[in-house]
Amino acid sequence: MGEIVDFDVRPTVIDGLLVMTLKQVTDERGTVREFYRGSALRAAGVPELGPWAQINVTATVQGGIRGLHAESMTKLVGVVHGSAFGAYVDLRPGSSTHGEVVTVSLEVGTQVLVPRGVANGFQATAPGVTQYLYCFDEEWAPGMAGLACNPLDPALGIQWPIPIDVQDRAQISEKDLSAPRFADLEGAS
């Protein structure tokens, strides 16, 4: 007999940032997950998404951090292999939740809807490699509108589960390490 996990949507303290559990059906052969079903999202009151203009999959080694990036695009993200610690920061000027930080344990079957202007970042936590899927409603382009914030900024209070060696480029890129701190972004607005 199979097991069914129903689709679920949970709001967070960041306006528009949603954590979703995918509908999953498991039997002796394995599991089928509905990564995207427009009718289920609409029924849950989620704003219309897509069409997706670009879909990326990253393979990130355990302990590696990517982000915090807040491009001018809506993202639907989730882990398709491994696990990650997701971190999200509202960088939208004028947002009622500006400056709020949300962290989520991301396992296969959990995804996050990230609104435009909310920074998305994660740390791969599973042994080996974690595959993280991004669906974008705009194509990424160098120099596109958006902000980046230093994921190690202590003012954000993000407790990354695996300690970071700032000299180790397998854990954090120079670009992410040199991104502005939140207070510096505030001074620029």
Image: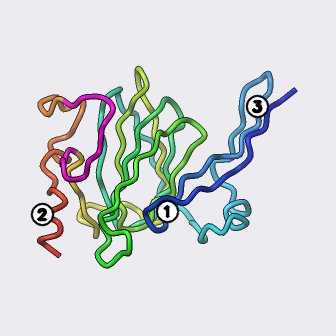
Q: Earlier in the sequence, mark 3 or mark 2?
A: 3
Between the C-alphas of marks 3 and 1, the distance is 30 Å
- Mark 1 neighbour density, 10 Å: few (under 14) some (14–19) many (20 or more): few
Q: What stretch is highlighted in magenta?
A: 152-164
Residue at numbered disc 3? 26
Query: Which x, y percent locates residue 158?
Result: 29, 45
Provide the secondary structure element on which disc 1 rests.
Answer: loop
Would you say residue 155 sits in the magenta stretch?
yes
- Residue at image position (52%, 31%) is 81
Q: Nearer the viewer, residue 105 or 67?
A: 105
Which of the labelled discs sits on residue 184, or is there none? 2
Residue 159 to residue 150: above or below? above
- Residue at image position (58%, 67%) is 49
Q: Which amino acid is tagged 1?
A: Ala
Query: Which x, y percent locates residue 11?
Result: 54, 60
Provide the secondary structure element on which disc 2 rests.
Answer: helix
In-image side of 106 versus 156 (left or right): right
Look at discs 3 and 1 and give the one toward the viewer.
3
Q: Earlier in the sequence, mark 2 or mark 1?
A: 1
Look at discs 2 and 1 and give the one toward the viewer.
2
Query: Which x, y percent locates residue 170?
Result: 24, 29
Q: Picture quarter containing residue 182?
A: bottom left
Q: Which amino acid is tagged 3?
A: Thr
Q: Picture quarter containing residue 115?
A: bottom left
Query: Which x, y percent locates residue 156?
Result: 25, 52
In-image side of 154 versus 115 (left or right): left
Q: Picture quarter containing residue 69?
A: bottom left
Q: Which of 181 and 80 is in front in this view?
A: 181
Which of the labelled discs sits on residue 53, or is there none? 1
Q: Earlier in the sequence, mark 3 or mark 1?
A: 3
Residue 43 to residue 36: above or below? below
Between the C-alphas of marks 3 and 2, the distance is 47 Å
